[in-house]
Amino acid sequence: MKSERIWNFSSGPTCIPLPVLKKAQADLLNYKGTGMSVLELSHRGKPFKEIWNNVREGFKKYLNIPETHKVMLIQDDASMQFAAIPMNFLAGKSVANYLITGHWSEACIEDAEVYCKVNKVCPSPPKPICSITPLEKWHVDPKGAYLHYCSNETGDGIMLYDFPYEVLPENMPLICDMSSDLGSRQIDISKFGVIYAGVQKNFGCPGVTVLIIRKDLLDKSTVLPITPSAYNYPLIQESDNEMYNTPVTWSCYITELCLDYMNEQGIKYYENLSIERSKLLYDFIDNSQGYYISRVDPKFRSRNNVIFHLSKGEEITKKFIEESELEGFSGLQGFKTIGGIRASIYNAMPIEGVHKLIEFMKKFMNENK
Ligand code: PMP
């Protein structure tokens, strides 16, 4: 049993800023004098409506969302979007483009194929090096309703910092799964048709998925008729306060607190922190004389999911994970299909956590040469 807080490098759910947890703890039994916990508030009552509106305003401020786009909060996980995206955005077309860069961008195709023909934009690059296929080999079907991609592959440790907009045919919406990087770097929202992300990486605890949707893409007449009402975005938009059914109230509340906390510094601060933390770790890996190795093409190394392997093999990797847990770290086990070690470093991870991890990696290397 642990008596202190540990360094949580899990891929999500993961650490939440300590001041947010303390505020939630203080509020738990009696939220703002209501005599109730947030867990007990009616979702249609005034105190919860305030939370609901603050979350949407908090996102607008933090991500600098233009008036052309709206913020929607959906009570489910990001995987549900794999089906909800084609249901809502095929716009009467039968083809959609999907760029595959790793596990998550591939996983969503299975669901999309139920509703449309999927054009895979390019072949997956050969393993074990993780990279992104060069643009010359991309083919975007101009008849496609949209192009979908994942900007940060949480399992593979690949990040596409800037989408090459020149490949996108005019008027084709760009749809992006930003589950593991939204909020950790500045982006130009106006370039996107739809962005979606589960909040459990950079904005709190699981339950809510945030969608940022260009308003003109919400068209009731083209939503597939089989779409369940709770995933019909134009219908949700028309509901009272854009709340179709009961939200995951606790997750909304924690997201509100996280956004308040992060808005004090702003997104540029968190982007710089993200660059600094990941650079420290990659530099250490690259200078470890091959003891630790990164197999991700340096051009696409994720700042949020730093994946590396121990060149001495699986047994020693297992030992690394076991010892890391005894030394106060958690969540360093690599993704199921990739193996090795994965350090997920989201907004709530202080730089001190990365210094401590490097200290541990140094010690482990010296003791296990
Ligand atoms: N997309 C990405 C990039 C993810 O990292 C994850 C989860 N780790 C998902 C989608 C699926 O999210 P959920 O488990 O909330 O459905």
Image: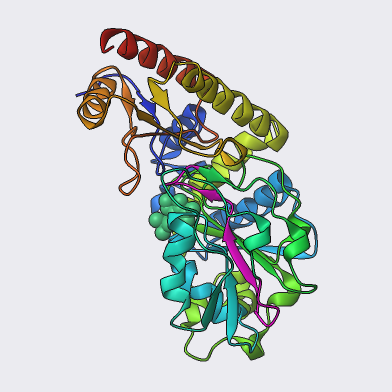
* Magenta portion: prevailing SS class: loop
Q: Is residue 204 above or below residue 226?
A: above
- The residue drawn where x is 63% and y is 35% is 262
Residue 249 visible? The answer is no
In this rendered view, identify the residue nearer to me: 280 or 166.
166
Q: Quadrant of ligand 1?
A: bottom left
Residue 21 image point, x, y percent: 44, 33
Q: Quadrant of residue 233?
A: bottom right
- Residue 147 within the segment the image draws in magenta: yes
In magenta, the rendered stretch is: 140-157
What kind of colouring is applied to the model shown?
Answer: rainbow
Q: Name the quadrant containing residue 344.
A: top left
Residue at the image point whose x is 59% and y is 52% from the top: 151
Horizontal and vertical percent position of residue 49? 58, 59
- Is 48 situated left or right of 8 in this image? right
Query: In the depicted view, which residue is nearer to us: 193 or 238?
Result: 193
